[in-house]
Structure formats: C-alpha cells, structure tokens
C-alpha cells in the first residue's frame, strides 16, 4: 500500500511525507507524522491569531 500525507493550504498543497509499498501495520510509521501535522496546525493557528492581533493594534 502506498501512503501519502499532504497538507492542503489556502494557496497550495504541501507534500509532508510519502511511504511507498508499506506492508502490514503501518500506523507506527505514519503516526509520528500525524503528530507533527497537528503541531504545525497549532503553530500556524497561533501565528495567524498573533498577526491578526498585531494588525488590529496597529490600526488603532
């Protein structure tokens, strides 16, 4: 089985990882990447919120 992890952003799609020809229980291979993606999502959300706040404060 071929497994690919992609992150779809508003302007592009990013290939995070690709595991060709995985056999058997592949969750131990893929699971760490999912944790990294969740962390990346949280970091992007915090950065976006900080940017919005900075813009609001600058507009005052």
Image: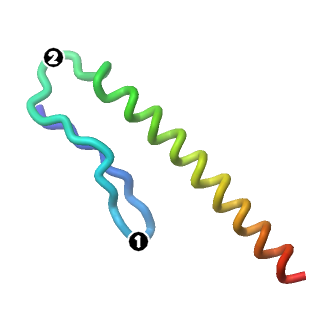
The image quadrant that residue 12 belongs to is: bottom left
Q: CA distance from mark 2 to mark 1?
A: 35 Å
- State the SS at label 2: loop
Q: Could you tell me which quadrant the C terminus lies in?
A: bottom right
Give the side of residue 37 with respect to residue 12, left or right.
Answer: right
Which x, y percent locates residue 57?
86, 73
Q: Secondary structure at mark 1?
A: loop
Image location of residue 50, percent across then percent down: 73, 61
Q: Who comes first in sequence, dot 2 or dot 1?
A: 1
Please determine whether, in this image, residue 2 is positioned above or below residue 59: above
Q: Which numbered disc covers residue 11?
A: 1
- The foreground one among 58 and 23 is 58
> Please, is residue 55 above or below residue 6 in the view?
below
Tell me which corner region of the image, top left, top right, bottom left or bottom right, holds residue 26. Answer: top left
Quadrant including the N terminus: top left
With 56 as the anchor, is 42 left or right in this view?
Answer: left
For this orientation, the residue located farthest to the bottom is 59
For label 2, the residue is 24
Q: What residue is rendered at 54% in x and 40% in y?
A: 39
- Residue 32 is situated, as x and y percent measured from the top left of the image, at 39, 28
């Amino acid at each position: 089985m071929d497994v690919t992890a992609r992150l779809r952003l508003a302007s592009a799609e990013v290939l995070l990882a690709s595991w060709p020809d995985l056999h058997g229980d592949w969750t131990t291979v893929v699971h760490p990447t999912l944790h990294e993606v969740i962390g990346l999502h949280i970091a992007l959300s915090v950065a976006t919120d900080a940017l919005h706040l900075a813009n609001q404060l600058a507009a005052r």
